Image: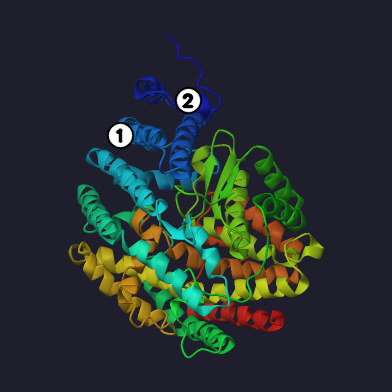
Amino acid sequence: MPLSPLPHHALDFMDWPWSQMEPYYQELAARPLNEANIASWLTEWSHLKKLVEETYSRLQLANSRDTANEQAEQRYHSFLDHVYPSILAAEQKLKEKLLASGLTTPGFEIPLRNMRVDADLFREANLPLLAEEHKLGSAYNKITGAQTVQWEGSEITAQQLRLQAQTPDRERRARVWRLLSARQLADREAVNALWVKFMSLRGQIAANADFPDYRSYRWQQQLRFDYTPANCLQFHQAIEEVVVPAATRVYEKLRSRLAIDKVRPWDLDYELYPIHLPPLNAYSTTAELEERTAVIFQRVSPKVGAYFETMRREGLLDLENRKGKAPGAFCTSFATLGQPFVFCNSVGLSNDVRTLLHESGHAFHVIERSKLPYYHQCRTGMEFNEVASMTMELLAIPYLPARQGGFYSDADARRAIVEQLENYLLFWPYMAIVDAFQHWVYENHAAASQPSNCDAKWVELWQRFIPSVDWSDLHPELETGWHRKQHIHRTPFYYVEYGLAQLGAVQVWANALQDQEGAVESYLSALALGGTLPLPRLYETAGARFAFDSETLRAAVSLLESKINEFEI
């Protein structure tokens, strides 16, 4: 009996059990492949993949939007336990079939390369382990999402507490910081216990796939064809040489401005960025955040402005922070719709503007690459995905003043730009800590499986890359800094991408300073390529060079510092 047509949208597919999905995979696997039908076969497989990917995205999103919702958690975990492993096994058979056929179609060279790696990595024994890894990530979110404190008679989230630190009263800032740190330290043993499980699981996954360590496995899994671990170590060294002195100058400027002896953690926001006083008042309500951001995007490009309006109209934004909501911000995609969904934790800080600009850059990437004929072509390395997001932060700079439709008076806009550019300088050293930490972890698996050793390594790296902040008498808070970086736990080795992408984004911005319209056009052209070209070619299309060296970094730092001096009041 012929199979019924697959649903057009994932909402009509989400509750299918594996037994209902399986016949569609079986039919694709059994169908003979030839030159005449390869395009239609790929189209059908592509649609099935979209249904599956959107199902996963929607289930994971529902769990992130309310980590206390047991029904959402159960649906997500049920999919991971009873459907996801079977999908991976069925996908493997289709990849093997296509690779064995020797057939291809225009624009499919890079997807085929990726499939070869996926096929080589596949092990039946890893299917339940990969599902378990997702569940451990959910458990991490549940721990951090439940971190609330009592402040002046009210229970508020950790994110909301950040608002209370935006004050010239240094003693109050210290009290806020210590309160939040105490709440985070209360979960120290829970996060440590989860870490031990992560490490055991990842070691077994790598061993099952015949890799000597998890780093070499993960390198292949992330499709890192264009650089090596040695390139990352080169990047760390370049950051230490070029950026750490520039970052030290930023911290010294903060120390002088605040008239203090030493910069302490409560003089920083999120342990890293200076608190600029008085705080910038960017917006009052989430509606205002959306509306003004929409105007900015219209000014950047009518095309991206229209994209953002569609997202607003169709409910594809969840911006407000609330109790039980997973931490952080991200953009996911609804593949059958060809639309993104942006998730943030906005509480009224000026940094929320930058976060929304960033995640919207990801969103526009989703929309542009969704126009490609096959879903397989949409898979782009995170090294370029983050160029999409970070470049949008910079392309929006001319439109931040209220007279351009943005958020600030001219004076406050200058301050916001200076803060943003200073934060770029401060981010590279922090990124180097996170990435170097992960290299150490998976080069020293047994030692790193002991959380106390991770604590010691984090302190060592922090002192190497951020020596200007005084953590005297705060050793437990400093050494558990790795607990608070979710990427380390949930998406290992996903962080150097931010540093590489920031370097690419600054190069695109340098072009925009000469020709904003042309830079935006090149940027959007690169987004539309999806994953059809190698990483260096995507950078080149956007107007940048994929690089790790001191000289490229020095040019970027020089531009940032010159613009900081230009905008500084």
Q: Residue visible at 49% across and 35% down? A: 54
Say which quadrant the C terminus sits in.
Answer: bottom right
What is the quadrant of residue 397 in the picture? bottom right
Residue extending furthest toward the front: 153
Q: Is residue 451 above or below residue 107?
A: below
* Between 507 and 17, the one nearer to me in the picture: 17
Dot 1 lies on which element?
helix
Q: Is residue 110 visible?
A: yes
In the picture as drawn, the residue positioned furthest to the top comes out as 1
> Going from the N terminus, do you reach mark 1 or mark 2 first?
2
Residue 85 position, x and y percent, is 31, 35
Amino acid, disc 2: Phe
In this view, the residue farthest toward the right is 403
Percent position (x, y) of residue 442?
26, 63
- List the single residue furthest toward the left: 446
- Determine which residue is flagged by label 1: 81
Kindly identify the residue that appears in the image at 20 percent across and 64 percent down: 450
Which numbered disc covers residue 515? none
Residue 2 occupies quadrant: top left
Q: Nearer the viewer, residue 383 or 17?
A: 17
Q: Residue at x 43, y 27 (%)?
A: 33
Residue 29 point in image, percent of width and height: 37, 26
Question: Which residue is denoted by mark 2 in the rendering?
Answer: 13
Q: How is the image coloured?
A: rainbow
Name which residue type carries label 1: Asp
- Asked if residue 216 lies left or right of residue 162, the reply is left
